[in-house]
Amino acid sequence: LSALLAAALLASGCASPRAPVIATDLDADRVIGLRVGQLLVITLPADRDSGRQWQLEQPTLQALALDGQPTYMRETVGGSADSQTAQSGSETWRFVAVRAGRDELHFAYRHPDDGQAPPARVIGYSVSAR
């Protein structure tokens, strides 16, 4: 994908990439504006111990490309390293704007093998690239 990113940057006339746009679940349902070649980093709350994970609901995107696989980071809340009282984490998704256009990103938080059950949570973003 780095070749795709480099091509997008050359096409947009950028010698270096712009700062990434950072979004969280608090930014859901807002329009996010990007320039071609710019990164969008979305961080969503997640608890892998529950067996759930975020799934991107769109099979294809028009203006964006997924930049690698989502990553999970565990966060420990309270207690010492020996006696952790609660664990949660976050999942981070990275996208790059590869052409001008719009995409609607819809994420569903569910068990990976339970595709027919309603998700525990859904989050959406509207992304416009120019």
Image (tube, rainbow, N blue to C red):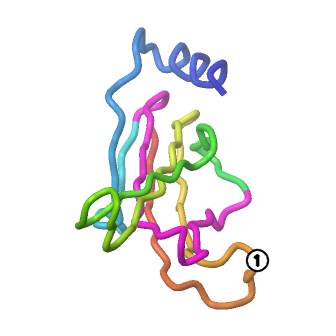
Residue at figure coordinates x 65%, y 78% from the top left: 111
Q: Badge 1 is on which residue?
A: 113
Q: Residues within 10 Å of mark 1 (few under 14, many from 20)?
A: few
x and y, in percent, of residue 5 in the image: 58, 24
Q: Position of residue 114 (x, y in %)?
A: 73, 83
Q: Residue at x 47, y 51 (%)?
A: 92
Q: Amino acid at mark 1?
A: Asp
Q: Quadrant of the C terminus?
A: top left
Specify the segment rendered in magenta.
Answer: 35-59
- Residue furthest bottom in the image: 117
Q: Residue at x 36, y 58 (%)?
A: 75
**Position above or below: 69 against 35:** below
Question: Extreme front residue here?
Answer: 82
Q: Closest to the observer: 96 or 85?
A: 85
Residue positioned most to the left: 78
Position of 28 relative to 16 (above/below): below
Residue 77 in the figure: left or right of residue 4: left
- Which residue is rendered at x = 44% and y = 63% of the image? 125
Placement of 39 over or under 3, stated as above or below: below
Q: Does 63 appear in magenta?
A: no
Picture mark count: 1
| Quadrant showing the N terminus | top right
Q: Position of residue 107 (x, y in %)?
A: 54, 68
Image-based side of 58 in relation to 33, left or right: right
Element type where label 1 sits in the image: loop
**Magenta stretch holds residue 42:** yes
Answer left or right for 114 relative to 37. Answer: right
